[in-house]
């Protein structure tokens, strides 16, 4: 049983982004196929402001969004806006992290549309500090992550965003999952990401510290999973369709994570349109079982793996067509139902 007192064994949810421009349509699709753990939709095709690196930038000191570029102008005096951020952080003023409809139409539509009872959890997401810090640059196109002061400010800013989002989601369901989305961690240890393991963990923990419900991290590529498994997360979300075998390289860390009640979110449904068209409920279900068996062969209880898992798409669905996104959610729900039936899961 997870922190929060409910089982997740094999239930379905989504990563976040959807290809719609109409928020209610995206919400309707999510609520149809993912009634147990519904996720609010990010809508990057609706507006550049809903790009995952822009969506959570609202209110960040010195940030400028112009056309389809976002950056921070460090040539200007940032002392006052930084002071305001740190004051909000020290006072735990989570209203500082409010996300407006302009930046997250899908989120605000979700709060209105997802009122039905019986949901096990409501899921939200926030961009992680490493990915945010590498994507958002200063006026000279230097990533903010490499400025010690601004890297710390990013983590505190995103912590307040996550806390505000979690509080708002509780109007839909008292139990929540907030995922810190970190695609850039797939480059961890490369020349592209020169951050140390210690900095990565410190910044992630700062953001995770603002979340009181279930905490997740999602990385859609291969990475050093031992880094993420040592954090305080309850859920590790990864692309199991393309990298399903990679967790088995870290059996000790995975076993320790599961032993403390951790949950693995298996992103087993592809988000590539051509690949998606070739897959079936049975083929994806078999692929999932195969990936799970790789872990069990490393001495990890198969029953534990089964009971402490979620089923998701491999990553967000914002880059594919609306029809393909609907197919991905339908397949995710079907694979989840089949998985639970195969293993006689009743709750």
Image (cartoon, rainbow, N blue to C red):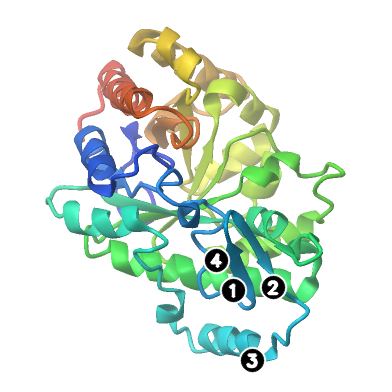
Residue at 33% x, 50% y is 40
Left-right relation of 109 to 79: left
Q: Which residue is mark 1?
A: 156
User: Residue lying furthest front in this view?
Assistant: 67
Determine the CA span between mark 3 and mark 2: 16 Å
Q: Which residue is mark 4?
A: 57
User: Where residue 80 is drawn, which disc sits there?
Assistant: 3
Reading the chain from its start, which is encountered first: label 1 or label 3? 3
Q: Are marks 3 and 2 in contact (CB under 8 Å)?
A: no
Neighbourhood count class around disc 2 (C-alpha, 10 Å): few under 14, some 14–19, many 20 upward: some
Q: Residue at x 20, y 35 (%)?
A: 32
> Callout 1: few (<14), some (14-19), or many (20+) C-alpha neighbours within 10 Å?
many
Q: CA distance from mark 1 to mark 3?
A: 16 Å
Q: Earlier in the sequence, mark 3 or mark 4?
A: 4
Distance in Å between CA atoms under marks 1 and 2: 6 Å
Q: Quadrant of residue 101?
A: bottom left
Q: Looking at the image, can residue 166 be seen?
A: yes
At which x and y percent is residue 131? Answer: 65, 53
Inter-mark Cα distance, 4 to 1: 12 Å
Q: Are marks 1 and 2 in contact (CB under 8 Å)?
A: yes
Q: Are marks 3 and 4 in contact (CB under 8 Å)?
A: no
Q: Mark on residue 152?
A: 2
Image-based side of 216 in relation to 113, left or right: right
């Amino acid at each position: 049983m997870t922190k929060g007192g409910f089982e997740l064994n094999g239930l379905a949810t989504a990563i976040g982004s959807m290809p719609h421009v109409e928020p209610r349509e995206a919400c309707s699709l999510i609520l149809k196929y993912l009634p147990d753990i519904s996720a609010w939709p990010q809508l990057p095709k609706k507006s550049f402001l809903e790009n995952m690196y822009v969506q959570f930038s609202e209110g960040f000191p010195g940030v400028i969004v112009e056309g389809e570029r976002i950056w921070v102008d460090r040539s200007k005096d940032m002392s006052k806006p930084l002071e305001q951020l740190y004051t909000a952080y020290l006072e735990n003023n989570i209203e500082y992290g409010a996300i407006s409809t302009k930046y997250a139409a899908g989120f605000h539509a979700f709060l209105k549309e997802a009122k039905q009872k019986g949901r096990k959890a409501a899921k939200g997401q926030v961009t992680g500090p490493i990915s945010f810090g590498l994507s958002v640059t200063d006026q000279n196109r230097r990533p903010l992550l490499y400025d010690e002061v601004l890297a710390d400010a990013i983590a505190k800013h995103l912590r307040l965003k996550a806390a505000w989002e979690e509080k708002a989601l509780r109007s839909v369901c008292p139990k929540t999952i907030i995922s810190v989305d970190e695609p850039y961690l797939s480059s961890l240890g490369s020349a592209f990401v020169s951050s140390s393991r210690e900095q990565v963990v410190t910044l992630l923990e700062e953001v995770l510290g603002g979340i009181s419900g279930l905490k997740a991290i999602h990385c859609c590529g291969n990475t050093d999973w031992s880094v993420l498994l040592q954090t305080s997360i309850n859920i590790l979300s990864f692309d199991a369709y393309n990298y399903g075998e990679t967790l088995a390289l870290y059996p000790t860390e995975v076993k320790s994570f599961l032993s403390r009640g951790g949950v693995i979110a298996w992103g087993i449904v592809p988000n590539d349109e051509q690949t998606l068209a070739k897959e079936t409920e049975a083929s994806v279900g078999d692929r999932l079982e195969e990936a799970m068996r790789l872990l069990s062969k490393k001495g990890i209880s198969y029953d534990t793996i089964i009971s402490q898992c979620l089923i998701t798409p491999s990553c967000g669905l914002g880059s594919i067509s609306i029809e393909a996104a609907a197919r991905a959610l339908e397949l995710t729900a079907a694979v989840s139902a089949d998985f639970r039936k195969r293993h006689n899961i009743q709750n």
